[in-house]
Amino acid sequence: MNIILWSTLSAAAQAQLLERPSLKQSTTLEQEVTAIIQAVAQQGDQAIFDFTARYDGVRLTELTYTPAQIAAQASKTPPAVQRAIDIAYANIERFHQAQQPATIRVETAPGVICEQRYAPIPAVGLYVPGGSAVLPSTALMLGALAQRANNPRRVLVSPPNAMGELEPALMYAAQRCEITEVYRCGGAQAIAALALGTESIRPVAKIFGPGNRYVTAAKRLVSLCPQGPAIDMPAGPSELLIIADESANAAYVAADLLSQAEHGPDSQVLLLSPSQRLIDAVCVQLQQQLTTLPRADIARQALANSRLIVTESLAQACSISQCYAPEHLSIQVIDPESLLPQLTLAGSIFIGHTTPEAGGDYATGTNHVLPTYGSVRSYSSLGLLDFYRRYTTQQMSPAGLQQLASTIMTLAETEQLTAHARALAIRLEDFQ
């Protein structure tokens, strides 16, 4: 990773430096994903079998994972892993339980009662990435919320391993969250199946979960289909930005950078610091720690698109972070609380030297499904309310109707919507 002096760059060079590598996509990505979606729409299960053979290297004859298969796989989970999943589940459940919505009832005028109510989304699709890593933590982050919201259909999809199976730890997490349906499929084809339906998989109303750029593109495209599902957010390749000062531990910083770099070659990590000494020390630590990482090759590819930036001050580092708007933001400075008012554009923030980003990935209780690509400017971290739809009711008593009639009729006539005004007038005539 090259060390960059921010203040020596032109504005154009600074903007280019903060570009996401995952957005430098080939012009054919959308066409490729569209072709996958169309194939699933036309061929159903057979298209998923074919794509699974092509991309995951296994030929399936059945997508459905039966309750017996789920239980059999879950039972193979080592006890220590079961305990870790149980503890993480409890913390996630505890934090999100506090987000439980309640009906709001307001008398906006005498005799006029308005309410805001919540109902669970009837069917939710939970995408858990696979491939180079097994992610029971993502099943918890999605499944615990769907369980708490009591969504009637909770549908989990994930790519199978080389044996055509789903890993025991993933199935243990699915059991813990009372997932109602499980299917062996991943990638853009799994998103298409959740959206459009196949012989095995009925369509869902909303799709959740992170994925690579193909999955992210598929989520966006299916959400544009007529009667297509809603999606949670653009949740693509992982991002971490660290702001650190002289008080930071270089080994901690390097470990945190590598923890996200090892997610995938299109991940991006950035370090911002006014301390050249710290950044030099982090460079040394990165090289040392890479030598012991099983996923070092993946991490090195991600580091090639990552940045070590020397800033003039912590204030400038905060300004750059706000411009980048990272998925994960780690503040490893002597007084992190003092920077928080300046740092509002991040999916999730990790405060202080003893708060590794990996904690939020697994077990602190916050959700690790977060917006990427700078979309935190308009999207939020995944929360319990995302699994509900809200709607309103209103009720007017005769007295309430009479009181508001003049206001409503005047506005209707101003907009030249005569039938609207008549809907009030016809009722007032009965009162008289």
Image (spheres, rainbow, N blue to C red):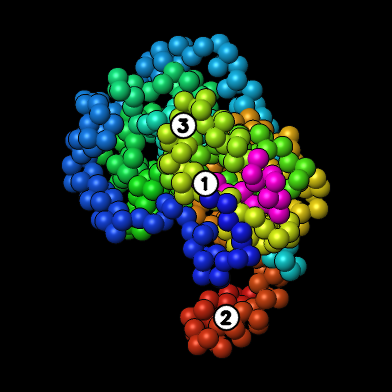
What residue does disc 3 label? 296
What residue does disc 2 label? 425
Around disc 3, counting alpha carbons within 10 Å, would you say few (fewer than 14), some (14 to 19), or many (20 or more)?
some
Note whether residue 103 is visible. Answer: no
Residue 344 is a magenta residue? no
Around disc 2, counting alpha carbons within 10 Å, would you say few (fewer than 14), some (14 to 19), or many (20 or more)?
some
Measured from the top left, where is residue 70 in percent x and y?
Answer: 41, 19
Q: Which span of residues is magenta-colored?
A: 267-281
Measured from the top left, where is residue 205 in percent x and y?
Answer: 41, 47
Residue 269 is a magenta residue? yes
What residue does disc 1 label? 1
Disc 2 element: helix
Look at label 3 and name its amino acid: Ala
Q: Which quadrant holds residue 341?
A: bottom right
**Residues tagged 2 and 1 counted as in contact (Cβ below 8 A):** no
Look at label 2 and name its amino acid: Ala
- Alpha carbon distance from label 2 to label 1: 73 Å
For the residue pair 187 and 103, the one nearer the viewer reads as 187
Name the residue rendered at 77%, 42% in the picture.
Answer: 247
Note whether residue 309 is visible. Answer: yes
Measured from the top left, where is residue 79 in percent x and y?
Answer: 56, 11
Earlier in the chain: of badge 2 and badge 1, it is 1
Earlier in the chain: of badge 3 and badge 1, it is 1
For the residue pair 404 and 105, the one nearer the viewer reads as 105
For the residue pair 166 and 387, the one nearer the viewer reads as 166
